[in-house]
Amino acid sequence: MLDRIRKSKNIKDGLGFLGTGIGSQAIIFLSSIFVIRELGPELRAYYAFLGILGFFLVPIFSFGFISGLNYYISSKKYQAKDVTKSVITIAFIRSMVIIVTVLLLKFFDLLGETGNKLSFWYLLPILLTFPLNMMKESFHRMLLSDSQYARANKLNIVYSSLSPVIVFLFVVVFKMELVGVVIAIVSTNILNFIITIFFVNKSFQVLDFKKSYNKVFVKEVFRYGIKGWIGDIAVTTSNRGDQLILSYFLPPAALGLYSICGSIGQLVWILPGSVRQILMNQNAEMSNVENRKKLTARYHAFFMITGLVITAVFILLAKYMVLFLFGKEFLPAVVPLQIYLVGTGIYIGTMVLTKYFVGEKEIIKNTYIQLFSAVVGLITALLLIGDYGIVGAALSSSLSYIASYCMALYFFNDFKLLYKQLNIFKRSLS
């Protein structure tokens, strides 16, 4: 077994991503404990809102470009070093559209209860660093798509450790509250961009401005990616739509309390998230449908069983985790967290199965899956949040995650294979 791990590049790469995920989450958690305690529920809400804004706007205004870029680099049809000028151009245009959109929403007071109360001068500096953030995101995705996992993993370590450390410094050490949050976000975006350029320039020569803009590449990327664009938006809506609706209709303190559900609940995704890109690349390169399906079923069996065990432990320990990490002020979030965890545990299956459809060039199925999930989430959120507050938001999210998994199973359409692989994995444990 140990000899197999040493020889398998996929296992070593997966363990590398897993180690990074666990290490980075540990840093983020240690920092967030002190930051959340320092800010309290209301200021924490404004911090969460600033994060949600970027989280929503990036996929909404991607127009499918990132999905298409991922596929065409993974499939080796285009070399990453040949398309950097095109990537930079599209990233800049997308960021300009986002900046104008947010400023218009702010001007017309359309950012909801939390966003409308947030000063324009807190928003503007963050918005101005969006072009850097967009380019950073694109270059990092190119590394992953080009199977340069070691280099991408090093950048993951930088991204995940730099932000919490800087936020901790300005909020906890210098006691600058929300001003410190803004300075930290802006500083992080600038530093992440500079470090990313340093890492990727050796591979892709991104600083070579003599390269030409490849119109054919851009057209093909958008033609492929647009099919999954609505799916990208739907994924985002499923993961953060509840928080956005809360921020729109309820006072900031409610969002501050509920935001820790996502922080803790999505920790169960570290394990499957560590190998999603590896599975995606393998599926994209495979030509045999049966082998692709069997490979996906194996990943599904492993991550569903281990993920659900971890989820059950989290549910049992939820109260103690919240009390120990964030204090008594956040205890009202315990029940919502337990409800939320049910959905995030089941969503692990969706995370794996959707990579099969990408390899099959049936990305439109991922769009249907995530759109169905988003519709369920939005409808239930609008029905439940008004009457049940953060409990309703958690139930809405859980139902949304479960709906996506049901739809993914329907499209995969091979329950026997999935069940067989689950049995094989369970027998190997016994």
Image (tube, helix red, strand yellow):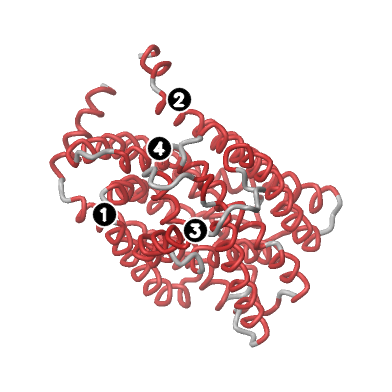
**Mark 1 or mark 3, earlier in chain:** 3
Q: Position of residue 131 (x, y in %)?
A: 65, 62
Mark 3–mark 2 contact, CB under 8 Å?
no
- Rendered position, 403 above or below 103: above
Residue at the spot of label 1 = 408
Residue at the spot of label 4 = 278
State how far apart marks 1 and 3 are (Cα): 35 Å
- Rendered position, 181 above or below 277: below
Q: Can residue 314 be seen in this view?
A: no
Q: What element carries label 2?
A: helix
Residue at the spot of label 3 = 214
State how far apart marks 3 and 4 are (Cα): 27 Å
Mark 3–mark 4 contact, CB under 8 Å?
no
Residue depicted at 33% across the width and 63% down the height: 367
Q: Where is residue 412 in the image (x, y as percent from the top left)?
A: 21, 50
Name the image quarter holding residue 117.
Answer: bottom right
* Left or right, residue 42 beside residue 403: right
Q: Where is residue 224 in the image (x, y as percent from the top left)?
A: 35, 60
Residue furthest toward the bottom?
A: 108
Q: Can residue 358 be seen in this view?
A: yes
Residue depth check, mark 3 versus mark 4: number of the one nearer the observer: 3
Mark 2–mark 1 contact, CB under 8 Å?
no
Mark 1–mark 3 contact, CB under 8 Å?
no
* Mark 1 crowdedness (10 Å alpha carbons): few <14, some 14-19, many ≥20: many
Give, as a three-letter code, the residue at label 2.
Lys
State how far apart marks 4 and 2 are (Cα): 11 Å
Mark 4–mark 2 contact, CB under 8 Å?
no
Residue depicted at 38% across the width and 21% down the height: 8
